[in-house]
Image (cartoon, helix red, strand yellow):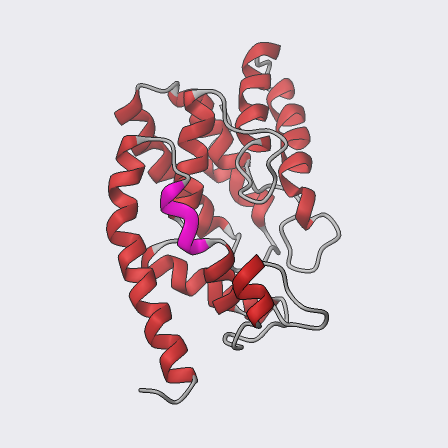
Amino acid sequence: MPTTEQAKKWYQGVDAIHDFSHIERVYRMAERLARSEGADLEIVHAAALLHDSRGTMPGSGERAEHHIASAVFAGEVLAEEGWPQERIAAVQHCIRAHRFRDKRERPETIEARVLFDADKLDVLGAVGVMRTIGYAVLAGQPAYVQPSQFFLATGQKEPGEPHSAYHEYLFKLCKIKDVLFTEAARAMAEERDAYLADFFVRFAAESRGEM
């Protein structure tokens, strides 16, 4: 079983949004959800430690496929530890299915749903505020730009339109609580979502000089 000490090495030099503190939070939340849902803790622990292990830097050519690269790396790590192939495949499914923007492989097992939910809870609440604005800054995008009417209507940007932290809230974060799988995660998401919504409503109003 990979250890947290071993996992620290996989996240050296990555951006502050996908660093080891994110992994630790997802690991703890995934364990909490796994116990609540009766999931296989060993599968969940391994998937949580490895889910962002490759390709997470903003602007990286691998960013959009980091879940695929991480699943491949997980297979190598677990094979070296002598894991049976079916359990390696279970961990790889969790990792491939954890990305919100990729609908090609959806979480089918309770372990994959636990990892998905734990990872998504980390973009809600106070941590979600920090990560969303931090990621925009690291990616060279503004914290706030008034979205175009086209973006508001379709979720797609006009040519040259920035993808600000506020854009990300409207595109993704405000939808998170409605796509979670486990009962425990959905319950926690209600309060975290309310906090996030209140923040971005005020943030937008202050940015427009309305408050």
Q: In the rendering, at what x and y percent does residue 148 appear?
A: 57, 72
Most extreme residue toward the bottom is 209
Q: In the rendering, at what x and y percent does residue 5 appear?
A: 48, 39
Note whether residue 123 is visible.
Answer: no
Q: Which of the image's four quarters has the C terminus? A: bottom left
Q: Is residue 68 left or right of residue 108?
A: right
Query: Does 53 appear in magenta?
Result: no
Residue 39 placement: quadrant: top left
In the image, what residue occupies the spot 33% across and 62% down? Answer: 197
Residue 79 placement: quadrant: top right
Q: In the rendering, at what x and y percent does residue 198 appear?
A: 29, 67
Most extreme residue toward the right is 61
Note whether residue 45 is visible.
Answer: yes
Residue 99 placement: quadrant: top right
In the image, what residue occupies the spot 54% across and 14% down? Answer: 87
Tell me which segment is drawn in magenta: 173-178
